[in-house]
Amino acid sequence: MTENSSEPDVLTATAELRIGNQKLQLKLVVPADEVPAETLLPTLHQLSDRVVDGVEERVRKNGLEISCRKGCGACCRQPVPISRAEARLLAGIVQGMPEEAQAVIRERFDSAVQHLREAGLEDRVMNYHRLSEEEVRSMTHDYFELGIPCPFLEEESCSIYAFRPLVCREYLVISSPDHCATLAEEHIRRLQFPVSIASAFAGMDGVSAPGENIYLPLIMALQWSAAHAAEVNLRPGPEWVQTFFKDLSGTDIPAPHLPGRTVEL
C-alpha cells in the first residue's frame, strides 16, 4: 500500500513462474481498486519480453539467429489481432500525443480503415473467428496485398515499440526477411513459444455475446474504443492478476492480496 494517501492503493507480489524450461520471477504491482484490464499490460509486456528473451537464448545456442531487425516492417502490414484492452491502451497513447502528431496518427488510422472497407474486407477481418483455417489464410493474404501499414509504423520501425501489442512481441522469425516481405508462409519459420501471453490475456476482458470475436484488427483500435467507451469492465487489480495466471496455466491461482508480501504462483 502506498504511504501517500492521495495516490491509489497498490498491492505488490512476486510471481514465480516456470514456463517451458524457464524459471522466471516477476514483480507484480497492481492497484487494489477496480481498474480496467489494460492496467495489467505493463506487467504483461515485461513478462512477454522475459519469455521471448529465454526463447531467443535457446535459439542462439542452436546456432540460429532472429531475423527481425529495426527497419524491417514487413509483418506490420498483416492484420494484427489485438485485444479490446489493448485497443483502449493504444487509443490512450494516441490521445496523449501532441496535437500535431496525434492528427497524423489519426489520419493514418482513418485511411487504413477506409482502404479496408473499399476493398470489401472489413467483414472478413472483423469476423475471422468464424472463418475456417483456409479462409483465414486467404483473408490474411488479401489484407497483406492491400499494403496497409500499421499506423504506428515510422521508417519501417515501430514508433510505440515499448507499448507494442503482445502478439507483435510474439511474432519473431528465423527465416529470411525476404519471405516476410512476400508473405510466403510456406517458407516463414516463426519461433514457437511454450505459452502465448497474448492469447491468455485476450479473453480476460469479456465479450458481450457467446461466439463473439475477442480480437480486433489493430487498425480498428481508435474507432472501436470511441464507440465502446462506456463498456469498460472494471475489476480489482488482484482479480485481473488471478484471472490472467489461471488462463495462462489452466489451474486455479491464489489472489495476490497481501501488500508487501511474496506470493508464489
Image (spheres, rainbow, N blue to C red):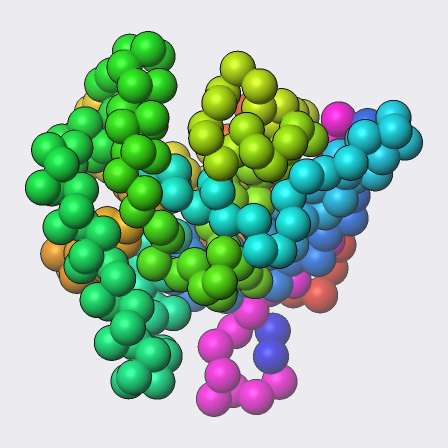
Q: Is residue 196 left or right of residue 203?
A: right
x, y (%) of residue 109? 24, 59
Q: Is residue 212 left or right of residue 214?
A: left
Which residue appears at 71% of the width and 65% of the height? 260
Residue bounds of the magenta highlight? 3-20
Among the 4 quarters of the image, the one containing residue 259: bottom right
Q: Can residue 28 be seen in this view?
A: yes
x, y (%) of residue 245? 57, 38
Q: In this view, does 193 lie to the left or right of 38?
A: right
Among the 4 quarters of the image, the one containing residue 153: bottom left
Is residue 8 in the magenta section? yes
Closest to the observer, 238 or 21: 21
Q: Is residue 244 visible?
A: no
Locate the C terminus and report the quarter of the image it occupies.
top right
Number of marks: 0
Which residue appears at 26% of the width and 39% of the height? 146
Is residue 225 in the magenta section? no
Which residue appears at 65% of the width and 62% of the height? 12
x, y (%) of residue 225? 22, 57
x, y (%) of residue 56? 77, 38
Closest to the observer, 145 or 81: 145
Among the 4 quarters of the image, the one containing residue 92: bottom left
Which residue appears at 35% of the width and 12% of the height? 133
Locate the N terminus and report the quarter of the image it occupies.
bottom right
Closest to the observer, 98 or 7: 98
